[in-house]
Amino acid sequence: MNKDPRSLIITPMITEKGTKIQEQAGGYLFKVRMDANKIEIKNAIQEIFNVHVKKVNTIVNKGKPKNLGRYQGRRSDWKKAIVYLAEGESISEFEVMQ
């Protein structure tokens, strides 16, 4: 099944850990759909930002249990991807956000 690249990548993530990864290893953090795999994420990033992706790591974060008064619930699980680019390349949109 062919998915739209812009629907796979939900949002870029600007966090302290993400900034550290970007400075030290040239990696960028993105929040992605749960059903997206590494190959789809790589192709989507290459198409959207016109860069060459060297490696993709994915992490699934489990939702935390939350209470609201006497009601109990759970936050949704979500997935993030760390995308490493080829040497000398960068995503200019991240430079603007910082």
Image (tube, rainbow, N blue to C red):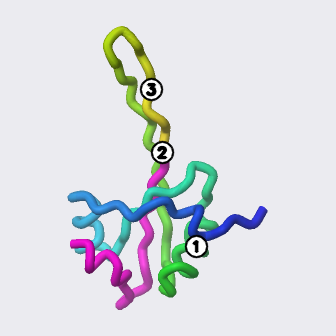
Q: Is residue 91 magenta?
A: yes
Label 3–label 2 contact, CB within 8 A: no
- Residue occupying the point 43% across, 79% down: 85
**Mark 1 burial class by Cα count in 10 Å: few <14, some 14-19, many 20+:** many
* Circles 2 and 1 in contact, beta carbons < 8 Å: no
Q: Quadrant of the C terminus?
A: bottom left
Alpha carbon separation for disc pair 3 and 2: 12 Å
Q: Secondary structure at mark 1?
A: helix
- Which residue type does callout 1 highlight? Ala
Residue in the foreground of this view, choosing between 33 and 68: 68
- Quick check: 62 above or below 2? above
Residue furthest right as drawn: 1
Where residue 29 sits, quadrant-wise, is bottom left
Q: Quadrant of the N terminus?
A: bottom right
Find residue 10 and report its horizontal and vertical position in percent. 49, 59
For label 1, the residue is: 44
Q: Of label 2 and label 1, which has the lower sequence position? A: 1
Residue 30 lies left or right of residue 50; in this view the side is: left
The magenta segment: 79-98
Label 2 sits on residue: 78
Location of mark 3 (residue): 74
